[in-house]
């Protein structure tokens, strides 16, 4: 327990004293201990888990009473409690043992020993703990050789993996998540068990699955996690559209790239360019509709016409099924999927400013993320082609910048309000108001008039008879 932040050491001392008063042995368990040995402890908000051979709630109350400016939350139905102090969230639970009925994944939970509690852990590296008890304070408890597995970068279950994964099938996802986050390998017996039992993930709620999947996606190299999800069969159980990207067809000796592995490369690429969770999801979804749009033409070869539009249409359906949000985050992903082919069409010197303006108008503030996605979509191993594509995108970005500086189209708002249109044309609320706004918008995007109020008003008055004829 060397080199632990002083405020953490102070907390451990308080907890040790509280546990001694209650005669309830207590241990630091789980991720904090694991990350300490991996040199991955963070300085920001930190969760620390504690197991006591006694009541977790009683210990939490005693600890909270001893800490100034702390807050206590009790969850009686789970037998747990949380104490918050500064940037620390301290979770307390009593040691438990679990037994499972034959046809249920809901365990019978009873009070247990530390050994009972460690047997419940999903992985050996998560069963490490430190004693905070006076007689052996700071001593490492490692019943399943978890330190050896950390050293060997090995993901392994503490007991037979079939039992571990049967008790809670989400542990299969967690094993892959930790392997992806830590760049570890899953030992063969555990990997084979996941493959054999992948169908059992179907009994897990979509909320728990998507939480683990998003953690995989937010790892440094999520392609590692997706590769394991694919090879074990887990991916097709909850995300068949992505699984179905895999495969290469050949007609008349003409093959196309495997869209599954391409997507994983795009995902890793976009992270190098700087990507939050939702831009990563856009990378995952950008080619999702290629399988049903795949066609072979003797002259053109393989085509996927319309996969951008169909992929955008699928986005909401897939987000809903996976339990992802259907708010502006879904709309952002859908927009990038729909527009991801557009920038490459702007490479020619002959492309009009109008086409540039329309892309800026449609993408709005997401234009920069769209360009990141487009750059990430270049996965060719041919260095000459890669350099040419990136130079093309340099040119497009320069054109975007020039047109935006001149026309100010990003997040554009119509210069004319509905009230102004009705007053100027002496009309009541009607479809004509919308027609005028649409006509002004098209005139600005086409470059017929500049993007300012006076030009828009003059344009309206010049064409007012045409608008009023449609009243």
Image (cartoon, rainbow, N blue to C red):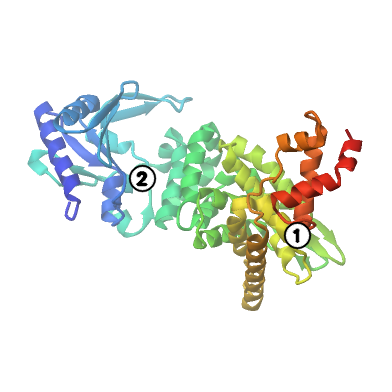
Q: Which residue is mark 2?
A: 123
Residue 403 visible (yes or no)? yes
**206 to the left or right of 7:** right
Seen from this angle, which residue lies furthest top? 77
Along the viewing direction, whichever of 265 and 261 lies nearer the viewer: 265
Q: Which residue is mark 1?
A: 355
At x 14% / y 43%, what residue is drawn?
Answer: 10
Task: Give the mark, 1 or 2, whose residue is nearer the N terminus.
Answer: 2
| Depicted 308 relative to depicted 252: above or below | above
Image-quadrant location for residue 75: top left
Q: Position of residue 308 (x, y in %)?
A: 72, 52
**Disc number placed over residue 345 in the picture, else none:** none
Residue 291 visible (yes or no)? no
At x 73% / y 55%, what residue is drawn?
Answer: 358
Q: Report how far apart the C-alphas of labels 1 and 2 lie in the structure.
A: 54 Å
Verify CB contact (< 8 Å) between mark 1 and mark 2.
no
At mark 2, the secondary structure is loop
């Amino acid at each position: 327990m060397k080199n632990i932040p002083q405020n953490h050491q102070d907390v451990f001392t308080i907890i040790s004293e509280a546990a001694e008063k209650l005669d309830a042995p207590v241990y630091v368990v789980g991720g904090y201990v694991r990350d300490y040995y991996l040199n991955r402890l963070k300085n920001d908000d930190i969760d620390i888990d504690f197991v006591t051979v006694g009541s977790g709630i009683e210990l939490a109350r005693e600890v909270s009473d001893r800490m100034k400016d702390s807050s206590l939350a009790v969850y009686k139905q789970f037998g747990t409690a949380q104490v918050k102090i500064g940037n620390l969230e301290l979770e307390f639970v009593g040691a438990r043992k679990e037994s499972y009925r034959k046809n249920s994944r809901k365990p019978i939970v009873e009070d247990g020993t530390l050994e009972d509690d460690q047997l419940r852990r999903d992985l050996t590296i998560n069963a490490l703990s430190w004693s905070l008890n006076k007689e052996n304070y700071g001593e490492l408890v490692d019943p399943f050789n978890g330190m050896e597995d950390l050293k060997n970068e090995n993901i392994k279950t503490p007991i037979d993996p079939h039992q571990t994964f049967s008790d809670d099938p989400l542990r299969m996802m967690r094993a892959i998540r930790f392997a992806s986050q830590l760049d570890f390998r899953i030992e063969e017996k555990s990997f084979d068990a996941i493959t054999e039992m992948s169908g059992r993930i179907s009994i897990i709620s979509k909320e728990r699955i998507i939480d683990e999947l998003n953690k995989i996606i937010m790892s440094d190299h999520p392609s590692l996690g997706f590769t394991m999800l694919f090879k074990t069969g887990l991916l097709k159980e909850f995300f068949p559209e992505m699984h179905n990207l895999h495969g290469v067809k050949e007609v008349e000796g003409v093959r196309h790239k495997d869209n599954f592995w391409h997507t994983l490369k795009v995902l890793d690429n976009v992270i190098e360019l700087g990507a939050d969770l939702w831009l990563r999801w856009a990378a995952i979804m950008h080619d999702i509709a290629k399988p049903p749009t795949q066609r072979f033409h003797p002259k053109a070869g393989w085509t996927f016409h319309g996969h951008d539009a169909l992929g955008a249409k699928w986005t909401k359906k897939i987000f809903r099924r996976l339990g992802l949000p259907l708010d502006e985050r879904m709309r952002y992903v859908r927009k990038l999927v729909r527009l991801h082919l557009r920038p490459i069409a702007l490479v020619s010197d002959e492309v009009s400013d109008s086409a540039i303006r329309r892309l800026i108008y449609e993408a709005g503030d997401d234009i920069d993320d769209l360009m990141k996605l487009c750059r990430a979509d270049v996965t060719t191993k041919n260095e000459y082609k890669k350099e040419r594509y990136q130079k093309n995108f340099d040119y497009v970005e320069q054109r975007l910048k020039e047109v935006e500086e001149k026309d100010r189209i990003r997040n554009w708002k119509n210069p004319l309000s509905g009230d102004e249109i009705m007053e100027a044309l002496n009309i009541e609320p009607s479809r004509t108001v919308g027609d005028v706004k649409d006509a002004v918008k098209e005139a600005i995007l086409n470059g017929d008039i500049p993007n300012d109020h006076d030009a828009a008003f003059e344009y309206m008055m010049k064409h007012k008879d045409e608008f009023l004829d449609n009243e």
